[in-house]
Image: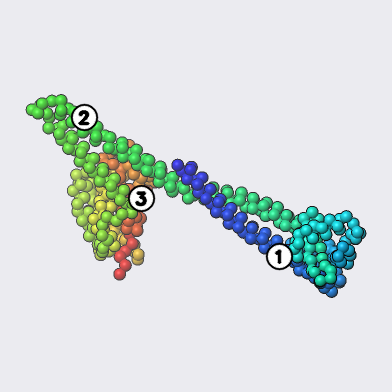
Amino acid sequence: MIRRLRLQVVAVCMLLVTAVLGGAFFFMYTAARDNIRDSTQELLRRVVIRDPRVDRGQTGIMIGGDQVQLPYFTVEVWGNTVYVTGGTYSDLENTDTLREILQSCMEQERETGNIPAYNLRYLRVNSGFFQRIAFVDVSMETASLQSMIRSTLQIGAAALLVLLGISVLLARLVTRPVGRAWNQQRQFLSDASHELKTPLTVILSNAELLDDVSLEERPARWADNILSEARQMRSLVEEMLTLARADSLVRTGVFSEVSLSDAATDCALLFEPVAFDAGKSLGCEGIDPDVLVTGDADRLKQAISVLLDNAIKYGAEGTSIALALRKTDRQARLQVENQGPPIPPEQLRRLFERFYRADASRGEQSGFGLGLSIAQSIAAEHKGTLRAESDEASTRFILTLPLLRK
């Protein structure tokens, strides 16, 4: 699919570029051809009316920026008699060549035209008693136009090759986000299927056991297993729906003035017992007052809760979790820090991927691996950022949001 998309992008780019170059070259060729023909026609007019400049040898025209002298000759036709009256040709009078040229000229019955067999252009003037005809050699004009066509084709071919390479590069750059999104979607479906498969298996197994025994012999734990796994499935589906809404840019709440200080304090109070049960402490002394932002209070609390829950799960036993909120000139900076083993850089880059959970070195914890992805989507929804840092001392998640504009 991505390969086909890249080919389509390249094809569209090349078609557009070819059309633009073709139009530009055609316009240049047409302008040059008309300019040369007008110059040749002006020379014919001077010759046929015997302009004094012709007698002084001024029979040149501009071709390709150079002054080019064109061979010419004039004839007068009196009935059936033909006289060569001037020009740069010699030995034309009473020749078969002259007769063929005149015959071709008379057959056209036009005032001006071309005689391709001899590379001549003529202009005929009828004075009543005789006809005066001027002929100019257009070999240089034809050669110049043909040379222009060859140069244009060479330049066009070289330009198209260069632009083809650029189009291929641009197609890769343009389709890279699409390919990444496509791969993420496939991975998301695969991981979601895997996460749903386990509770479904438990539910079906317990349901089959319940169906095989009588009502009096059914242990309560089988029903509890079904209820527990069903709740787990509901939680997973709700988290997946949250991410789906974030991907579709659908705003699920109404944005208003929110005190991030109050939101952070409320979340800290809720998670203090959780941290105590996990053998850790939660400190929130570093919360600046009156930090106001624009957003959805519930969604912001959800993002802070995800960060606190993650810190409690992966913090080292007996350590403290630190929640801090600072206000700068333009941003609110909320940080959740836990002590514990450092996260390797290759894992740190993947923490916000959906269904990604750290390896066994950090301990297997409950959850689906969607919390940090949801928190990042909430930050993006509020035009903020969420990033992770880790060193030998601690791991920190930093949420930045723009302050409320008053």
> Of marks 1 and 3, which one's residue comes earlier in the chain?
1
- Image side of residue 80 versus residue 370, left or right: right
Residue 66, relative to residue 4: is it above or below?
below
> Of marks 1 and 2, which one's residue comes earlier in the chain?
1
Single out the mark in the foreground, 1 or 2. Answer: 1
Asked whether residue 394 appears in the rendered view, the answer is: no
- What's the residue type where badge 3 is placed? Ala
- What's the residue type where badge 1 is placed? Asn
Identify the mark at residue 35; answer none if there is no mark.
1
- Whether pointer 1 and pointer 3 mark residues with C-beta atoms closer than 8 Å, the reply is no
Q: Position of residue 224 (x, y in %)?
A: 15, 35
- Image side of residue 295 versus residue 107, left or right: left
Mark 1 and mark 3: Cα distance apart in space: 68 Å
- What's the residue type where badge 2 is placed? Ser
The quadrant the N terminus occupies is top left
Within-10-Å neighbours for mark 1: few <14, some 14–19, many 20+: some
Picture residue at 32% right of the left edge, 51% below the top: 246
Identify the mark at residue 82; answer none if there is no mark.
none
Mark 3 and mark 2: Cα distance apart in space: 40 Å
Single out the mark in the foreground, 1 or 3. Answer: 1
Identify the mark at residue 205; answer none if there is no mark.
2
Q: Position of residue 207 (x, y in %)?
A: 18, 31
> Of marks 3 and 2, which one's residue comes earlier in the chain?
2
Q: Which residue is mark 3?
A: 388
Picture residue at 23% right of the left edge, 43% below the top: 235
Q: Position of residue 278 (x, y in %)?
A: 22, 43
Secondary structure state at the residue bearing disc 3: strand
- Image side of residue 363 versus residue 36, left or right: left
Secondary structure state at the residue bearing disc 2: helix
The quadrant the C terminus occupies is bottom left
